[in-house]
Image: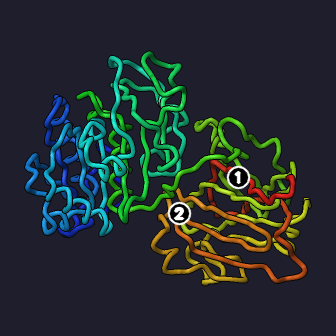
């Protein structure tokens, strides 16, 4: 797998062994408009590889698309390709490669490619329609757990050529970032304008970004880190939940959900990161609980992003009655644990003390300390299911008469001195049988 991320300009780690997951293929063949930034892009990707423990091969020769050759790569990067660049046999080889778990990264004009190949259109997520002149615009970062966008603030102001697309990928892919169409001229997507997204597709992983037209982009650290995160997702070096997401209400984020509806029970606290606009909160001291006091919930899907600093301890509590005693949540609710090094029934993804996570699935899905992870905790009646970065890791049904998941509050734990766990983008989608709550 690709090694730990080194930001552009940092020292290069020792190069890994040559194998599938540590080598990418950069493909930049054009049969239409040719971007003068392609050489800059190739050079930048080679530099990212040298600094982040993966090898980079670059070609414009479509005969590289054979089963045997493609199997050498963890991901194939389509760098501003245009037009029909693969013949039917090469297309079949690439379809098989994706079906066998391969990765795809599309950069900018990759969406202006292979209009008559439906598989590719689905993989890229959307086809190019038009663009206005190069100009500054504001990119709104929607997903701040994905490695391609976790380094960014809520808004990212930059200059590029901003594509309009023939369709909106929001219903088939996880939108990572979108354009504020009021911040520039020429947007044609009626105010919902995705510009970067990811998805699992036909057995493989796909990441696309509409950024990267200009030569200057490939000297921009934030953009290079954006590309690096997309590559790491596509190769499987890190996991992310790339299922489409609509219909969630923020309980804690930069816009609709502040801390006013939350209450601290017990010792310790959570500190807001003002440099992040207050969107990230980090635990300190304890053992306490920050709980959503405005109202309880019945059937719902709760999602939240979390990050451990090191070997730390925390958890997400559900199904407990209102109380300013944190032990009420322990005794009357259930905790979904965050602590990767504890015993099986008390480790990340476990229903604490009751049911272990699927450890093999958890280990495959878990990103290491310092990187963001996403939980989905789905409660329906007495059934509780947990996904970690989109991967199912627990399916539990309550049979304890002293507890009930049918209605209760939610909360996040600050475990104690020395435990540092951060949370952001806490959001909820109430399910149809929510009983009017």
Q: Is residue 342 in view?
A: yes
Residue ID at (69%, 57%): 302
Q: Quadrant of residue 364?
A: bottom left
Q: Which mark is residue 390?
A: 2
Q: Quadrant of residue 252?
A: top right
Where residue 401 appears, x then y in whole percent? Answer: 89, 82
Residue ID at (18%, 36%): 38
Q: Say which label, 2 or 1, has the lower sequence index.
A: 2
Where residue 43 appears, x then y in whole percent? Answer: 17, 41
Question: How many circles with numbers are drawn on the protein?
Answer: 2
- Marks 2 and 1, how far apart in space? 16 Å
Q: Residues within 10 Å of mark 1 (few under 14, many from 20)?
A: some
Q: Is residue 416 in view?
A: no
Residue ID at (53%, 51%): 244
Where residue 20 appears, x then y in whole percent? Answer: 23, 68
Q: Is residue 47 above or below residue 300?
A: above
Q: Which mark is residue 227?
A: none
Residue ID at (24%, 54%): 76
Give the colouring mode of the picture.
Answer: rainbow
Secondary structure, mark 2, is loop
Residue that label 1 marks: 429
Q: From the image, which quarter does the N terminus lie in? A: bottom left
Q: Residues within 10 Å of mark 2 (few under 14, many from 20)?
A: some
Q: Quadrant of residue 273?
A: top right
The reply to whether callout 2 and callout 1 are in contact (CB within 8 Å) is no
Secondary structure, mark 1, is strand
- Nearest the viewer among 277 and 26 is 26
Where residue 413 appears, x then y in whole percent? Answer: 73, 62
């Amino acid at each position: 797998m690709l090694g730990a991320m080194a930001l552009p300009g940092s020292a290069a780690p020792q190069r890994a062994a040559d194998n599938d997951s540590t080598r990418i293929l950069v493909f930049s063949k054009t049969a239409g408009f040719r971007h003068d930034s392609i050489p800059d892009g190739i050079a930048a990707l080679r530099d990212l590889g040298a600094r982040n423990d993966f090898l980079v091969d670059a070609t414009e020769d479509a005969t590289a698309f054979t089963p045997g050759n493609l199997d050498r790569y963890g991901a194939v990067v389509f760098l501003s390709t245009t037009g029909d660049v693969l013949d039917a046999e090469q297309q079949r080889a690439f379809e098989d490669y994706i079906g066998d778990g391969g990765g795809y990264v599309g950069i900018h004009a990759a969406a202006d490619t292979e209009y008559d190949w439906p598989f590719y259109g689905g993989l890229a997520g959307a086809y190019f329609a038009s663009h206005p002149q190069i100009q500054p615009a504001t990119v709104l970062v929607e997903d701040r757990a994905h490695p391609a966008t976790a380094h960014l603030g809520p808004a990212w102001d930059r200059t590029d050529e901003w594509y309009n697309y023939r369709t909106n990928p929001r219903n088939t892919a996880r939108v990572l970032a979108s354009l504020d169409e009021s911040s520039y001229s020429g947007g044609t997507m009626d105010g919902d304008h995705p510009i970067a997204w990811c998805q699992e597709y036909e057995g493989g992983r796909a990441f696309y970004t509409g950024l990267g037209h200009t030569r200057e982009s490939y000297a921009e650290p934030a953009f290079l880190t954006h590309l690096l995160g997309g590559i790491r997702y596509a190769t499987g070096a890190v996991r992310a939940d790339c299922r489409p997401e609509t219909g969630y209400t923020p309980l804690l984020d930069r816009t609709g959900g502040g801390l006013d509806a939350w209450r601290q029970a017990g010792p310790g606290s959570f500190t807001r990161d003002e440099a992040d606009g207050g969107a990230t909160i980090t635990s300190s001291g304890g053992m306490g609980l920050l709980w959503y006091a405005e109202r309880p919930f019945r059937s719902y899907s709760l999602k939240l992003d979390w990050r451990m600093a090191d070997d730390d301890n925390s958890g997400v509590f559900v199904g407990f009655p209102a109380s300013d005693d944190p032990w009420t949540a322990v005794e009357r609710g259930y905790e979904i644990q965050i602590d990767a090094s504890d015993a099986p029934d008390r480790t990340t993804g476990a229903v604490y003390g009751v049911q272990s996570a699927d450890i093999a699935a958890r280990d495959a899905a878990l990103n290491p300390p310092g990187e963001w992870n996403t939980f989905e905790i789905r409660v329906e009646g007495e059934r509780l299911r947990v996904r970690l970065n989109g991967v199912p890791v627990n399916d539990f049904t309550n049979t304890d008469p002293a507890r009930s998941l049918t209605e209760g509050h939610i909360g996040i734990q600050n475990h104690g001195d020395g435990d540092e766990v951060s949370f952001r983008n806490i959001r909820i989608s109430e399910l149809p049988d929510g009983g009017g709550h």
